[in-house]
Amino acid sequence: MQQLLHPICLALAGLGFLLLLWPPERLRRDRALAALAGVYGFSAVSFLVSLEPVRRTLDDLTGRPSTGILAAFGYVEAMPALQPVVLAHWDLSPEQARRRSRWSPAAGAAVVTALAVLFFQLTPTGRSTPHGFTVNYLHDGVYQGYLTLSITAYVIGEAYLVARCRRVARRTGEVWIARGLRIVAAGAVLTFGYSAVRLAAVATADRLRAALAAYRCGETSQNPAEYADAATREDLRTPDDDVRALVRIAAHFTTADAGKDPSPSWT
């Protein structure tokens, strides 16, 4: 599904980016337009590096598996860093907008830098898809920190976007602009559900690991058919089927029952 939707999203974001670039003279005069073009550009590149051929090329160029996944995370975090700049210049005087819009690009750069530092502390496990990357590292304390930082920063950025869009929509006299801003705000709210699911995965990682460890040790009398090979597998490789099966297994255990696993965890 991702390989089907991402090219479509790439085309839409790329088209928006190119339209905003013309005529170029406007970008020098209009800071809001320049920042909006940056948002579209980062969005387009995030979808581009998520495509499997591009991911593989980045892996080969850098000599590090899953570098494309890091790049996609970075570009996604860059978008909320520029969105406040757009809204500040739409809503405030030029001087006020310049003062208000300094902090978000700096915060975005700090988050992307921290994500890169955490990423390169992970032990390479070979090429993987974005979903497989999460599953492979979900029980790693460094990756839990990486994912928590990424999702938390994104939620903060989207929450700010919702609040500012609603404010600007109330203040503008243009009906179509107000409607567009409310649609953007509604779309940002939808991302909260996705973020909650990702954070829940971090919160339940230890319990799922404990359940799998207990199952491998034969501490359950039930053998779910969905995960019959759990005793021989160290890593989860298919997020959908395996995580559903693990949840069924975990229902038979408490964390304390399998607390012998000494692997470090980040909470």
Image: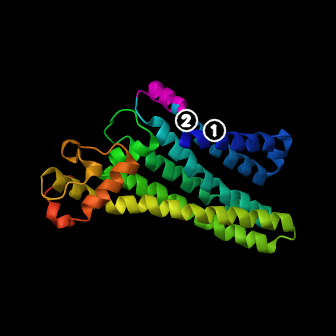
Q: Crowdedness of circle 2 by 10 Å Cα count: few (<14), some, many (20+)?
A: many
Between 121 and 175, the one lying in front of the other is: 175
Residue 264 is a magenta residue = no
Q: Residue at x 83, y 39 (%)?
A: 24
Q: Position of residue 145 (x, y in %)?
A: 37, 55
What is the x, y in percent for residue 44? 65, 42
Which quadrant would the N terminus be assigned to in this image?
top right
**Circle number at residue 51:** 2
Question: What amino acid type is highlighted by mark number 2?
Answer: Leu
Circle 1: element type:
helix
How far apart are labels 1 and 2 at the CA level? 8 Å
Left or right: 111 with respect to 6? left
At which x and y percent is residue 166?
71, 71
Q: Identify the residue at image location x=70%, y=61%.
A: 184
Compared with residue 146, is residue 251 higher up or lower down, i.e. above or below?
below
Looking at the image, tell me whether mark 1 or mark 2 is earlier in sequence order: 1
Residue 8 in view: yes
Indicate left or right for 220 with 71 as reference. left
Few, some or many C-alpha atoms within 10 Å of disc 1 (few <14, some 14-19, many ≥20)?
some
Q: In the displayed image of the protein, which residue is found farthest to the bottom?
A: 170
Instruction: Please give left or right for residue 245 compared with residue 27 in the image.
Output: left
The answer to the question of whether label 1 and label 2 lie on touching residues, with beta carbons closer than 8 A, is yes
Residue 7's label in the rendered image is: 1
Q: Position of residue 247 (x, y in %)?
A: 31, 60
What residue do we see at 53% from left, 29% from top?
53
Q: Main secondary structure of the magenta part?
A: helix
Q: Which residues are magenta?
A: 53-63
Which quarter of the rendering shows the C terminus?
A: bottom left
Q: How is the image coloured?
A: rainbow
The dot on residue 171 is none
Residue drawn at 80 percent across, 42 percent down: 19
Regarding mark 2 in the picture, which secondary structure is present there?
loop
